[in-house]
Image (spheres, rainbow, N blue to C red):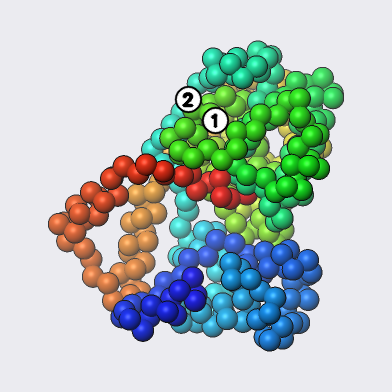
Amino acid sequence: MRTYFTEIQTAFASDLIIHLEDNEQILLANHLGCSPAEVSAMSEAELDQKVPPELSHPVRSLQFLKQSRGVTTIVDPLAEFVPGGIPTRTLWPAATSAFTPRSRNNDLREKLGIPDLAKVIFYHGNVHGANFDEMRELYRAVQQLNESGHPTWLIRAGRDSPEFSQEVAPLVAPCLIELGFVKRAKDLPELMSMADYFVQPGLPGPFNDYRFPSKLPEFFAIGRPVILPRTNLALELTHGTDAFILERADCDSITQAVIHLNRDPTQCKRLAEGALAFSAKRFSWSKSAAELEQFYLENTDLEKPDDRQREAAKLIWNTPSTDASPTSQNQS
């Protein structure tokens, strides 16, 4: 994005607003196989050689941020990376209108060979270097649940790294359904309706504290108990009401949470209702869009659009797309 903006800024008079969604320093360190401190110690020339174009260059990205008129973030802690004096605004993602409360789709479960008494965890999202370890914990939890007499199936959508497919997926092969990349976003809610639980594995730290997995609003919108670690979104949730919050969503903790909920259908019902209530109250694309518009008006030379411009934008936005893809599968 930085190089693209550099190319076009000479051709167009434009203000720069930047959006942050990840701790780019951690992503780069993971890619290079070293610590953030080691990355910080590298010279600019060394970074020029090692940083691929799809990742943020520590020196040049800071220079880029300093050029901006404002920065939006997906979670509050990302503001730590914004140079002083630059306005910031946190904007949450939401689920599209396709994601609505749904009863459990037993017909589809039966067609896929899932036994009536088995529990289903559904997870959509790609597996890559940054989330490899925590996704392995989810798979190990499914393995542990089945070995301890709690039949559990894992339904996956998204793409996996070759290493993950070879090393981790076989752990739960008899109870794993891999859907691959689900191209049409409208198909995801129906597939998700097979779930009994949604689980976001992981733990607090420099990776998860600075991100907001975009699948989470979709989890909440379907209306199932959501199990997740005490980081990012969970810091805004109440345990036992909005979700089932774990200090660390690792193998053992996920296993115990699922067993606990299996034995307490009353709490499952309460958590499903709580997820829907939180979704209705806190996740809204229209609200986020209105806040973004206000941020633009406050920090750029843009003028508020008139009614005709708004109607034209709505027409463009509502034009059907033949290959709309769910962004959540591009996230961990």
- Residue 69: image x %, image y %? 41, 77
Q: CA distance from mark 1 to mark 2?
A: 9 Å
- Residue 205: image x %, image y %? 72, 58
- Residue 126: image x %, image y %? 62, 47
Q: Splitting the image into 4 quarters, where does residue 26 fall?
A: bottom right
- Within 10 Å of disc 1 (Cα), the crowding (few <14, some 14-19, many 20+) is many
> Which element type, helix, strand or loop, lies under badge 1?
helix
Residue at 55%, 69% in the rendered image: 79
Q: Can you name the residue that lies furthest to the left here? A: 308
* Residue 207 in the figure: left or right of residue 183: right
User: Considering only vertical position in the picture, is 188 above or below 77?
Assistant: above
**Mark nearer the viewer, 1 or 2:** 1
**Residue assigned mark 1:** 192
User: What label sits on residue 102 in the rendered view?
Assistant: 2
- Residue 279: image x %, image y %? 47, 39
Residue 282 seen in the current view? no
Amino acid under disc 2: Arg
Q: Of 179 and 97, which appears nearest the observer?
A: 179
Residue at 49%, 70% in the rendered image: 1
